[in-house]
Image (cartoon, rainbow, N blue to C red):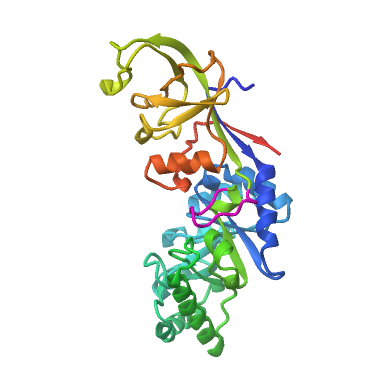
């Protein structure tokens, strides 16, 4: 048993299993892009990429240039798409590291072209109203196509792909997703009619892969499902295997009575004498303070409630009736049910729970 105060155990075999499961859902010529932004959703981007590359993966995506540089300097060889906008002053860096940059319009693409030779994917806003070239309706395709033509004609810019992002594909019956797809496909048809080559076409995110297989196009982007978690309660695939287990340790065990209070703010007072454990994980490790008095932890198979406010490095639990001692392992989460329960208690989503596991938490990789 590990003696570390807190540890994230990452099952790379589960990641590979999920990759294969997703791949088996795709048409023979559809590529699979692995989204490894936010340090692979807290799982460790370099280690995840190396495992996937050994398995034959060639396509990766990150949020920003800093994440991309970490991967390149960590030895990742595959294609790396930056999903966010990179300041034009980094153009030479994009070229140096052979990175593919997302562009959201002619003006930005033009600025990049004046500094370096860069491969790009054009981002199209079909209704997310975030980044992208505006194309919310099929009739917007004419104007959007003309702007893409201008990008295509720029010196030093090579359009290697085009994509959009679904806003509510985690709803299996979402008319809005079909509306977005119709707008995007109208643009693709217009570009083809105009003779404008745009490379790899992609729109399906994790939820889209599960709920809208008919929209696969040339490539899909697997994010949360690559790590074995579900995009939403409505979008479930029970063949996925969670890849992260977060554990801590019991630091001390003692008893307190009804006259005692627990932690900062003295927000908890027991109704009677109880046995209390101090657990060596806190909000600086990723156990949000919002979960104070709400979360449960698992010690020797028993779920015990967190009591009092969660501290930066520690928290307390009521272990009355639980046979535990100093050094025992404490499971924070290990499966979809655990992560989803914590997310619901924190009024957030499972993505945030795993992404919140901080860099100071050591990772142990298993196959």
Residue 363's place in the image compared with 40, above or below, is: above
Please say if 75 is above or below 126.
Answer: above
Between residue 56 and residue 13, name the one nearer to us.
13
Q: Residue furthest left?
A: 265
Q: Residue at x 57, y 42 (%)?
A: 44
Q: How many numbered marks does the figure carry?
A: 0
Q: Nearer the viewer, residue 99 or 358?
A: 358
Residue drawn at x 53%, y 13% is 326
Question: In the rendered view, would you say 11 is above or below 99?
Answer: above
Left-right relation of 51 to 338: right
Q: Magenta stretch: give its range.
A: 229-240
327 and 88: which one is in front?
A: 327
- In this rendering, the answer to whether 353 lies above or below 278 is below
Name the outermost residue toward the bottom: 193
Residue 57 picture location, percent across and down:
68, 56
Residue 138 appears in the rendering: yes
Q: Is residue 25 in the magenta section? A: no
Residue 292 falls in image quadrant: top left
- Regarding residue 74, the answer to whether it shows in the image is no
- The picture places residue 149, in percent across and down from the top left corner, at 48, 83
């Amino acid at each position: 048993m590990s003696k570390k105060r807190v540890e994230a155990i990452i099952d790379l075999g589960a990641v590979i299993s999920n990759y294969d499961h997703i791949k088996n859902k795709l048409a023979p010529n559809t590529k699979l892009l692995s989204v490894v932004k936010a340090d692979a959703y807290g799982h460790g981007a370099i280690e995840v990429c190396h495992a996937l590359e050994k398995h034959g993966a060639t396509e990766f995506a990150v949020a920003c240039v800093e994440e991309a540089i970490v991967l390149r300097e960590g030895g990742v060889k595959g294609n790396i798409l930056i999903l966010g906008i990179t300041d034009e002053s980094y153009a030479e860096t994009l070229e140096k590291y052979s990175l593919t940059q997302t562009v959201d319009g002619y003006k930005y693409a033009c600025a990049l072209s004046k500094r370096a030779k860069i491969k790009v994917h054009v981002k199209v806003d079909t209704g997310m109203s975030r980044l992208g070239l505006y194309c919310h309706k099929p009739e917007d395709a004419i104007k959007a196509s003309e702007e893409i033509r201008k990008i295509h004609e720029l010196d030093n810019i090579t359009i290697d792909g085009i994509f959009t992002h679904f806003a509510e594909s985690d709803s299996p019956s979402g008319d809005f997703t079909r509306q977005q797809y119709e707008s995007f496909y109208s643009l693709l048809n217009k570009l083809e009619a105009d003779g404008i080559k745009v490379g790899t076409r992609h729109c399906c995110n994790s939820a889209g892969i599960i709920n809208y297989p008919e929209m696969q196009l040339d490539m899909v982007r697997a994010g949360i499902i690559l790590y074995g978690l579900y995009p939403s309660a409505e979008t479930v695939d029970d063949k996925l295997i969670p890849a992260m287990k977060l554990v801590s340790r019991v630091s001390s065990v003692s008893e307190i009575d009804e006259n005692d209070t627990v932690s900062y703010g003295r927000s908890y007072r027991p109704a009677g004498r109880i046995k209390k454990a101090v657990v060596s994980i806190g909000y600086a490790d990723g156990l949000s303070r919002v979960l104070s008095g709400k979360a449960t932890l698992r010690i020797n198979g028993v779920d015990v409630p967190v009591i009092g406010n969660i501290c930066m490095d520690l928290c307390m639990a009521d272990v009355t009736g639980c046979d535990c001692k100093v050094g025992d392992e404490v499971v924070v989460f290990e499966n979809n049910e655990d992560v989803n329960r914590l997310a619901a208690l924190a009024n957030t989503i499972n993505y945030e729970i795993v992404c919140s596991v901080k860099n100071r938490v050591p990772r142990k990789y298993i196959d």
